[in-house]
């Protein structure tokens, strides 16, 4: 596995990975209505444009295996971990941990003293394992559907 910086030409594969991961991996904790609201297929074109812009602006890393994108993560320069997803067929192989380690190292290099994220029910145990602590639970609304997640923070 190789971890590298995001390139604009990665965006279509990244968005596809996001949709597949949400609908497969998160179905253990969210209903189909919630998954459809979180990752609606009819927003692909808008998501490609919006995400490309924000991923270029953020600190974004891509995990590759034999040329295939198997994970990605991005964080603002202020320490907001925005997105972290691992391909549905590559779960539990250390990819998310490697991406997180890379983001945390970059944050430390930049003098950021804490990282914050909104973690899904599915991702919460992963972040807890990496010493993030829950500071609040919340219900966010997407397309009129409530999705529960957790505000989490790690002091560096």
Image (tube, rainbow, N blue to C red):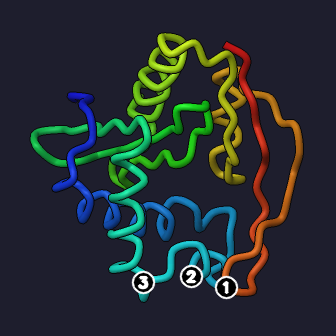
Q: Quadrant of the C terminus?
A: top right
Earlier sequence position, callout 1 versus callout 3: 3
Which residue corresponds to the image point at 28% horizontal and 37% vertical from the top-left?
63
Q: Are marks 2 and 1 in contact (CB under 8 Å)?
A: yes
- Measure how far apart labels 1 and 3 are at the Cα level: 13 Å
Res. 151 image quadrant: top right
Q: Is residue 5 left or right of residue 58?
A: left
On the image, the x and y values in percent for residue 37 come to 61, 80
Which residue corresponds to the image point at 65% horizontal and 51% vertical from the top-left?
122
Pick out the residue farthest to the right: 136
Q: Which mark is residue 41?
A: 3
Res. 80 image quadrant: top right
Judge whether 94 appears above or below 84 on screen: above
Q: Is residue 62 left or right of residue 108?
A: left
On the image, the x and y values in percent for residue 84 come to 49, 45
Q: Which mark is residue 53?
A: none
Residue placed under numbered mark 1 in the picture: 143
Which residue corresponds to the image point at 21% horizontal and 28% vertical from the top-left?
2
Q: Is residue 122 left or right of residue 5?
A: right
On the image, the x and y values in percent for residue 58 come to 43, 41
> Is the residue marked by circle 2 packed among few (<14), some (14-19), or many (20+) residues within 10 Å?
some
Which residue corresponds to the image point at 72% horizontal and 29% vertical from the top-left?
128
* Secondary structure beneath label 1: loop
- Which residue occupies the foreground of this view, 142 or 78? 78
Q: Are marks 2 and 3 in contact (CB under 8 Å)?
A: no
Residue placed under numbered mark 2 in the picture: 36
Earlier sequence position, callout 2 versus callout 3: 2
Q: Quadrant of the N terminus?
A: top left
* Secondary structure beneath label 2: helix
* Secondary structure beneath label 3: helix
Judge whether 39 appears above or below 101 on screen: below
């Amino acid at each position: 596995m190789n971890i590298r910086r995001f390139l604009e030409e990665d965006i279509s594969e990244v968005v596809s990975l996001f949709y597949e991961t949400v609908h497969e991996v998160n179905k253990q904790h969210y209903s189909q209505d919630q998954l459809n609201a979180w990752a609606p297929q009819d927003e692909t074109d808008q998501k490609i444009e919006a995400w490309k812009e924000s991923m270029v602006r953020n600190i974004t890393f891509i995990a590759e295996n034999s040329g295939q994108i198997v994970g990605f993560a991005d964080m603002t320069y202020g320490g907001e971990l925005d997105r972290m997803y691992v391909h549905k067929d590559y779960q539990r192989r250390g990819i998310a941990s490697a991406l997180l380690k890379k983001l945390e190292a970059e944050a430390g290099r930049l003098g950021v003293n804490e990282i914050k994220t909104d973690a899904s029910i599915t991702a919460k145990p992963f972040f807890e394992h990496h010493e993030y602590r829950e500071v609040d639970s919340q219900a966010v609304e997407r397309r009129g559907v409530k999705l529960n997640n957790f505000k989490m923070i790690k002091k560096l």
